[in-house]
Every structure is written in structure tokens, then in C-alpha cells.
Image (cartoon, grey):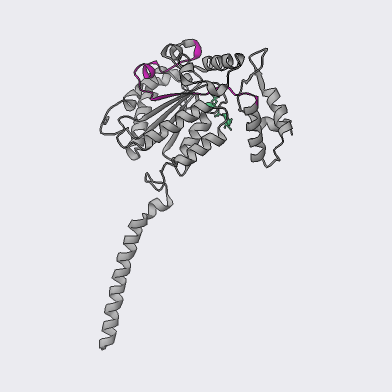
């Protein structure tokens, strides 16, 4: 075939076009990073802190926890915005049942990871589920250490939530201590961007006691300061076997950055929880229903009946009996 100059020219142009196209496409692919476009990666597209979102969530969705709300917002903001962190962030959330400890952990996850609690970088470990047998403690220790190391190696901004820590075998928490400490790196891995959250009822009784004293003496709940709860979150209280305590070595060695107290919930907070639940269930919020329910939930201490023993726990399932 005779190539006319114009066909040769056309072929040349076409070839150029193809090359340009290929170059452009590969640039584009690496620019938008196709695998990370569809799948969660340890990158800012998937992990970026929304401070306003957390603030609004804490203010509007968490009821009756002025101290927890303030401490958590400050702590997380400080940690995320600090490029020179010397150790991972370690929060220890304490308080009676159903007062919002898991709820708040979820809020933190939702405002840091695009996928929230479903993120592959957020890990929830429940003592009774994941570490049920005391006899297996040595195996758990090895597995837990390797597992944390593996996760932090693949994403340094990993979050670990340890639930029911007061039911956890003490040696287990001790085994991860090096990761929580001020080390530049442990076995080549840096833990300084990771977040550890421990949840427990430890100190809860003491917190209730303080809240009750405020109530009895007519002082406002919102005036309870962290220093009023100092003894509830003190080393001796947290080590007391009767309060089901646990991580003495963590507490004693100052590896916990912030102790966060959760107060027992009162009538008006239960009402708020019920109204939220009604809305979530597609029901018309009805304060008389919420009031009746709160009446039944507020059950201790006797005879005053000031707080709800189960907090806002199980409001969703109990609601059917009231509407
Ligand atoms: N302070 C609160 N404000 C708003 N909702 C709350 C609050 N506390 C609890 N709730 C509601 O009750 C549910 C149960 O609370 P959550 O699981 O956070 O309790 P908890 O403090 O972890 O209790 P436990 O010590 O028994 O584990 C939450 O999912 C949330 O819907
Ligand atoms: Mg919980």
C-alpha cells in the first residue's frame, strides 16, 4: 500500500494522540488513585478529622455529659492537630451503664473516619467476646500484640476501642503497655498517631455518689468539675477490687492521657433519649410518652429516685410498651 503523505501524517498524529491519551490516563489514574477511590485507604480522603462535626455531635446528641463532652473535644482536637505527638492518645472513659461511653466512641470514629465504626482502621475489642477464657491469657497476649502491631503498621492512624475493660484480665492490658508509652518506635513501628480508648464502669459508683451529693445539696449538675471527681478516678479507686478494677499499671504509669467521667442520667436526659428514639423510629415525638417512660427508668438510689440505673440503655426496645 502506498502511503500518501497525508495518511502517514494522519497515522503519526494518531500515534501521538494515543501516546498522549495513555500518558494522560495513567496520570489521571495515579492522580485520583483508582484503588483508593473505590476502597478505603489509610489516606486523607478516608481519614480526616471534622472538628465541627464532633463538636456539634457532642453538644446536640450527647445528653447530660458536660465534662465528658468538653474533655473529649479538647483531647481529640489537641491530638489530631499536633504533628509532634510523643505517644498515642489514650482515653479512659468511666461511668455507670448506659451513659454514653460507646456512643461517644462512635462519635469520635464517625468524625475521623469516613466509614465511621465500619472503617477497617477502627477496631472494637470486647473483653468478654474476644478474650473470654482466663486460661488462654498467654495466647491472647501474643495475638493481641501482633494484631495491634499489624494494624498500626498498615495504618498509623488506627483506633482501638477496648470495651468492658473492667472484665479484662489484667495481664492482657499490661502486655500492650509498650505501645501506649513514650517510645519513638517499638520494633520499627510508631504508635504515635494511634488512638486507644478504654471503656469501663470503673469508678462509676463513686461518680454516682458525687452526682448525688450535688443533687442533695441543691447544686447544679453542670457545676460538677473534674476536680470533684478526682477521688472517683484516683489510683486507689481504680485499683479497688470491689469496683471491678483493672489497669493499675496503666494508671500508675501515667499512660492514660485523659480520664473521662460519665455522670448518671436524670429524668430530663431520659426524656431526651426517648424523643430521639421516637424520631428514629418514624414516630411523632410525644413528650407525655417520654415522660412516662422516664418515670419508670428513674429508679435509684431509693428512696430519692434521682437517676436511671440503666441510663438510656434499651430505650429502643422498651419503647414499644409505651406507644
Ligand atoms: N448521654 C447520652 N446521651 C444520648 N444518648 C445516650 C446517652 N447515653 C446513652 N445513650 C443512648 O443509649 C445507648 C446506650 O449507651 P452506651 O452504649 O453508650 O452506654 P455505655 O455507657 O457504653 O454503657 P455500658 O457501661 O453498659 O457499656 C446509646 O447508643 C445511645 O443511643
Ligand atoms: Mg458500653
The image quadrant of residue 296 is top right
Q: Quadrant of the C terminus?
A: top right
Quadrant including the N terminus: bottom left
Percent x, y of residue 238: 45, 15
Instruction: Relative to 168, say whether 236 is above or below.
Output: above
Q: Is residue 181 visible?
A: yes
Residue under the point 62% across and 23% down = 266
* Residue 157 vs residue 169, the one in the foreground: 157
Q: Is residue 98 above or below residue 15?
A: above
Q: Is residue 288 left or right of residue 211?
A: right
Front residue of this view, candidates 74 and 116: 74
Q: Quadrant of residue 50?
A: top left
**Residue appearing at x 35%, y 61% in the figure:** 28
| 31 in the magenta segment | no
What is the x, y in percent for residue 209?
55, 14
Residue 277 vs 226, above or below: the answer is: below
Q: Which residues are magenta?
A: 242-267
Q: Is residue 118 visible?
A: no
Count of labels shown? 0
What x and y, as percent, mark residue 58? 52, 34
Give the residue displayed 37% in from the left and 56% down from the top.
Answer: 32
Taking 80 as reference, is 101 left or right? right
Instruction: Pinpoint residue 12: horizontal percent, then vertical percent.
Output: 26, 78
Closer-to-camera residue (228/38): 228
The residue under the point 47% across, 43% down is: 115
| Residue 108 shown left or right of residue 213 in the figure | left
Amino acid at each position: 500500500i502506498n502511503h500518501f503523505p497525508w495518511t502517514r501524517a494522519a497515522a503519526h498524529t494518531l500515534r501521538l494522540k494515543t501516546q498522549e491519551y495513555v500518558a494522560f490516563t495513567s496520570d489521571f489514574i495515579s492522580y485520583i488513585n483508582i484503588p483508593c477511590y473505590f476502597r478505603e485507604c489509610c489516606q486523607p480522603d478516608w481519614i480526616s478529622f471534622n472538628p465541627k462535626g464532633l463538636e456539634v455531635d457532642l453538644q446536640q446528641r450527647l445528653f447530660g455529659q458536660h465534662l465528658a463532652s468538653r474533655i473529649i473535644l479538647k483531647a481529640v482536637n489537641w491530638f489530631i492537630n499536633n504533628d509532634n505527638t510523643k505517644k498515642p492518645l489514650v482515653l479512659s472513659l468511666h461511668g455507670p451503664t448506659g451513659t454514653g461511653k460507646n456512643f461517644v466512641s462512635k462519635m469520635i470514629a464517625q468524625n475521623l473516619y469516613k466509614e465511621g465504626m465500619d472503617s477497617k482502621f477502627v477496631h472494637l475489642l470486647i473483653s468478654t467476646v474476644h478474650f473470654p477464657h482466663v486460661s488462654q491469657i498467654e495466647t491472647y497476649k501474643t495475638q493481641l500484640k501482633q494484631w495491634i502491631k499489624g494494624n498500626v503498621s498498615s495504618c498509623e492512624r488506627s483506633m482501638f476501642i477496648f470495651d468492658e475493660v473492667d472484665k479484662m484480665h489484667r495481664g492482657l492490658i499490661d502486655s500492650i503497655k509498650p505501645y501506649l508509652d513514650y517510645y519513638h518506635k517499638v520494633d520499627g513501628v510508631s504508635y504515635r498517631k494511634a488512638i486507644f480508648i478504654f471503656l469501663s464502669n470503673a469508678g462509676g459508683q463513686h461518680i454516682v455518689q458525687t452526682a448525688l451529693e450535688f443533687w442533695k445539696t441543691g447544686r447544679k449538675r453542670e457545676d460538677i468539675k473534674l476536680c470533684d471527681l478526682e477521688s472517683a478516678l484516683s489510683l486507689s479507686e481504680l485499683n479497688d477490687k470491689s469496683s471491678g478494677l483493672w489497669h493499675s499499671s496503666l494508671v500508675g504509669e501515667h499512660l492514660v492521657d485523659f480520664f473521662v467521667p460519665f455522670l448518671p442520667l436524670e429524668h430530663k436526659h431520659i426524656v431526651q433519649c426517648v424523643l430521639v428514639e421516637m424520631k428514629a423510629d418514624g414516630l411523632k415525638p410525644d413528650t407525655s410518652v417520654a415522660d412516662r417512660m422516664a418515670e419508670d427508668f428513674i429508679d435509684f438510689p431509693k428512696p430519692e429516685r434521682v437517676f436511671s440505673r440503666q441510663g438510656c440503655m434499651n430505650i429502643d426496645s422498651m419503647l414499644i410498651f409505651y406507644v
